[in-house]
Image: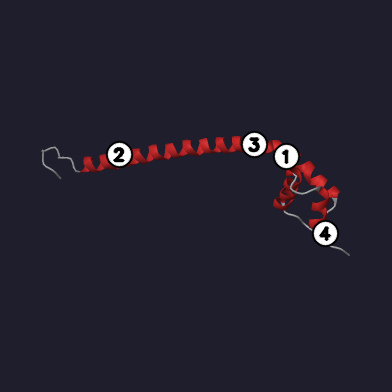
Amino acid sequence: MKTRRKFTPEFKSEVVLQLLSGEQSMAELCRTHQLTSQMIGHWKQQFLAAASRAFERDADRSAEQERIAELERLVGKLTMQLEIAKKASTWRDGAPGRNGRWS
């Protein structure tokens, strides 16, 4: 009994790109990789169906990057406020008392 071969997405996309670019013909790819034309045709259909989603990720990433930038600004602002509060508390602790003398 023959075991089924498993192909990585990278391999599949490489084969389809070679076909679409005209680098190799369908017959050459079938012989080179010992694949059937039906399998490569199926991969090609999947590849072309998912092609429009390739650009959606950029929009998602830019939204995520904007959120990250916003959170980093907030962290910076809070850090500065904390530093100011620390300095203010040291000044308050070292302030002269009611009698005008330093503690």
Residue tagged by mark 2? 84
Q: Position of residue 3 (x, y in %)?
A: 83, 62
Is label 3 in contact with label 1 (beta carbons under 8 Å)?
no
Q: Position of residue 50 (x, y in %)?
A: 72, 39
Q: Earlier in the sequence, mark 3 or mark 1?
A: 1
Foreground label between 3 and 2? 3
Quadrant for residue 83, please give it: top left
CA–CA distance between discs 2 and 4? 66 Å
CA–CA distance between discs 4 and 1? 25 Å
CA–CA distance between discs 3 and 2? 44 Å
Q: Earlier in the sequence, mark 4 or mark 1?
A: 4
Q: Earlier in the sequence, mark 2 or mark 1?
A: 1
What kind of residue is marked 1? Ala
Which residue sits at x=86%, y=63%? 2
Quarter of the picture holding the C terminus:
top left
Is label 4 in contact with label 1 (beta carbons under 8 Å)?
no
- Judged left or right of residue 34, residue 83 is left
Residue tagged by mark 3? 55
Which residue sits at x=47%, y=37%? 69
Number of the label disc, if any, that sits on residue 42: none
Element type at marker 4? loop
Residue tagged by mark 1? 50
What kind of residue is marked 2? Ile
Residue tagged by mark 4? 4
